[in-house]
Amino acid sequence: MKKQKAVARNTTRLLNIQDYGYYRADLLGEAGRTVYPEGALIGYEESLSGTISRQKRSLQIINMQQQCLETETLKRVIDESGDASLDYFSSKKNVVRGDLKGLARKGGR
């Protein structure tokens, strides 16, 4: 994604906090229902309707909501135990394993 930063399709993505995936909006289609956040402020059909700019704005709102929800979760995980955060991040399928190794070194594990 970093190499193709100027490519428009890389700018509109949907965050899924269950697996930490950022899914391209133009590829969501019907399969998007499986990664679309449960309880999102904007419904699935509504988020993909209208103009491209409206879709982009809807996804920005949904992503911000998801980031806020995940922030609260991370706060609880860290408050409970610093070691628990590594286990939490390990449970996310789209977290880069190299990043987990870096966290383990910083945490003394």
Image: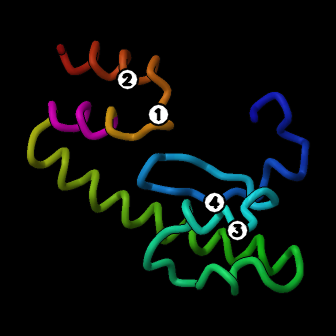
Numbered disc 3: secondary structure: helix
- Amino acid bearing label 2: Leu
Mark 2 or mark 4, earlier in chain: 4
Q: Which residue is mark 4?
A: 14
Distance between the alpha carbons at the discs numbered 1 and 2 = 8 Å
Q: Is residue 17 above or below residue 2?
A: below
Our reading of the magenta stretch's main secondary structure is helix
Binning the other alpha carbons within 10 Å of mark 4 as few (below 14), some (14 to 19) or many (20 upward) gives: many
The reply, left or right, for residue 27 in relation to residue 86 is: right
Distance between the alpha carbons at the discs numbered 2 and 4 = 23 Å
Distance between the alpha carbons at the discs numbered 3 and 2 = 32 Å
Q: Position of residue 69 (x, y in %)?
A: 37, 66
Numbered disc 1: secondary structure: loop
Distance between the alpha carbons at the discs numbered 3 and 1 = 24 Å
Q: Residue furthest front?
A: 30
Residue at 55% x, 47% y is 21
Numbered disc 2: secondary structure: helix
In the rendered image, which quarter is residue 44 located in? bottom right
